[in-house]
Image (cartoon, rainbow, N blue to C red):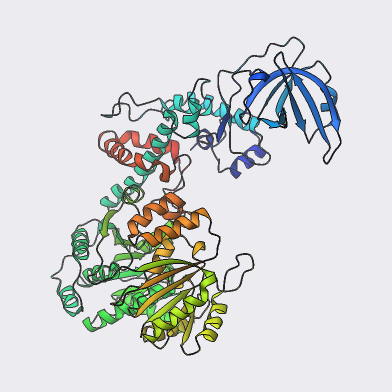
Amino acid sequence: MNDFQDLSGITPKAIENLAKLNITNIFDLLFHLPLRYNDRTVITNISDITCNKELQVIGQVYNAKVVFGRRRMMTVTLIDDTGEITLRFFHFSSSQLKGLSDGKRMLCFGEPRRSGNRIEMIHPQYRVLQEHEIVTLSDRLEPVYPTTKGLQQKRLRSLVDKALKWAEKQKTVFEDVLQDMPGMSGEIIPMLEMLNEVHKPCADTDKQSLFDRQHPAQKRLVFDELLAHHLSIMKIRVRSNLRKSYQLKSNGSLTELFMQNLPFKLTNAQSKVLEEIKKDMSADHPMMRLVQGDVGSGKTVVALVACLYAVENNYQAAVMAPTELLAEQHFRYFSHHLLPLGVQVAWLASGLPARKKREMLELISTGTAAVVVGTHALFQDGVEFKNLAVSITDEQHRFGVQQRLQLTRKGTENTIHPHQLTMTATPIPRTLAMSMYAHLDHSVIDELPPGRKRITTVAIADSRRDNIIERIREVCQQGAQAYWVCSLIEESDALQSQAATDTHAHLQAQLSDLRIGLLHGRLKSTEKDAVMQDFINKKINVLVATTVIEVGVDVPNASLMIIENAERFGLAQLHQLRGRVGRGEKQSSCVLLYKAPLGDLAKKRLEALRDTTDGFELARIDLEIRGPGEVLGTKQSGDMQMRIANLSKDLALLPDVQKAAHWLLENHPERVEIVLRRWLGNAVEYANA
């Protein structure tokens, strides 16, 4: 990747300022597109001025003066043959005032506004013209870029112009790789032409199409960027298929025994996904599969059976969860079902006492523990597996790229790579998932276990808190249990959010006849475990908790969920929290307690949650509201960041992007590097996990 050595006249200070805009090389500069454009291609008569629209006028200065009022200002009357306009400057120097003597000609650009019966411009850009100067108008719109302190628009435009001149000499890098693709003929605009058109559009360009990001040059650049990212991910899969893995073929004796002991029958969706996993694991290259399942669809059972496929072949399996609470829940679930089958399960988390940790590490390294469950502690130094054949990551979007990769590396021995299964309870729209996880095969558990009843969801203002508390009393007196979820552990004046500890004390006072528990992330692991066990064993009627219960917690007797400050949660998180109830035979309810008045986005989130329990439909709405970076968790995990493309707006392009990527890999693999170089350079491929 070329940095700035080929860009003449660029100073270390400019490089430092460019870095603040995430511009670290010439390609970054070329793909740093304008926010908007100034139209300096025409001169408007003052009498033809349209207010609230930027334009350019030429006139003679009359009566430039300093006015003293509530604010000191300089006013200038500008006159042409058709009328006059007032210019106002709140920041000015004495030399400016001196240079604007009566009769001077002035070229002025700004946004006119009406003030009473006059038209004025506030702080317009201007240039005093020479006495007989003829103004030469540009035939291009003037770009206005996102910039930063210390880097003026004029300087940034100059740097981009130099980058465009440099690009004209780099024919190979800007080759049009799709020019002969079937179905693309007639649609291809040369890359350099696209860049010039976006940075310096012609005067007659449809300005509205530029503003709406619908100009052909913009759309083609977006397509090219999406293509680069898609190819990058697909190359990971190509490399993966060249690696060797353990071929897990067995008689299924343990799996069959496990199935016989289950108190329920697997759904058709679960059975279908397990067949896909089994087929993958029997191959001699690593499985790379993403399992999506809505809340309560039974992903944990699928993960357990996947582990058994490894155990039946005398290999190890590891399951990594993002929180200790979820990992502990998995450990209890796996132990409950696997110990009767003679399968040893190890538990590993950072909070383990030193003696217990040494014991677990011994079980793992010797292979005594065939299944290992834990948090990110699984991939830390000192953890050695005997023969890890299956690596399972639950709630994969909570982990960064390098974290997911490190767990897989734990099982890499003698060039043999473990099978990878990643799971998420946060549904992702199918087209988006197929693009962003193109290196993974996809399975969807789109069927809930039989007997599950739809959860009734209501949004209620917190002014009716007392009514909600009375509802809790009724539910608990009927033998059920309830959750009360808070967004913070301690009081925060800034957020005006009720803390879990205060809510716990308040509910104890209001519901003195009930047993109220408290669960949050600052409790010790043993304390959290004890509270959760008491709730599971019905020793606690109401559990006040933070979002530590968001995923994995399974208490069939809990039928009421109160989410306080619901307007502060994201849609996916609200859906996950709601999924903690509705797991038994009782009709369940979720109350979204909000603080009025609601903002537009918060109102849209709560309405969507009230209207549907379909996680994939909620994921589609969430994508519209928050954008793909949040939905996929990329802001936390460091996965993908786009320069130009916006997946929530450009989703419709993805099917054609996928076709183009497959066509290039199959017919012109030598062109793939061209696309990758101009967009990704020598950066580490973000999808390498």
From the image, which quarter does the C terminus lie in?
bottom left
Q: Is residue 471 above or below residue 572?
A: below
Q: Position of residue 665 (x, y in %)?
A: 28, 38
| Residue 630 at least partly seen | yes
In the rendered view, tell whether residue 266 sits above or below residue 662.
below
Q: Position of residue 327 (x, y in %)?
A: 39, 73
Q: Residue at x 51, y 72 (%)?
A: 464
Can you tell which quarter of the image residue 160 is in? top right
Position above or below: 652 against 467: above
* The furthest residue to the front: 117
What x and y, as percent, mark residue 358?
A: 42, 80
Q: Looking at the picture, tell me which residue is in the foreground, 671 or 66.
A: 66
Q: Residue furthest top?
A: 132
Above or below: residue 358 compared with residue 196: below
**Residue beneath the point at 72% across and 11% down:** 133
Task: Give the side of residue 204 with respect to residue 481, left or right.
Answer: right
Q: Quadrant of residue 666?
A: top left
Q: Indicate left or right for 315 with 473 as reference.
A: left
> What residue appears at the point 48 percent right and 79 percent down from the top-left corner?
469
**Residue situated furthest bottom in the rendering:** 513
Q: Nearer the viewer, residue 489 or 613?
A: 613
Residue 353 seen: no
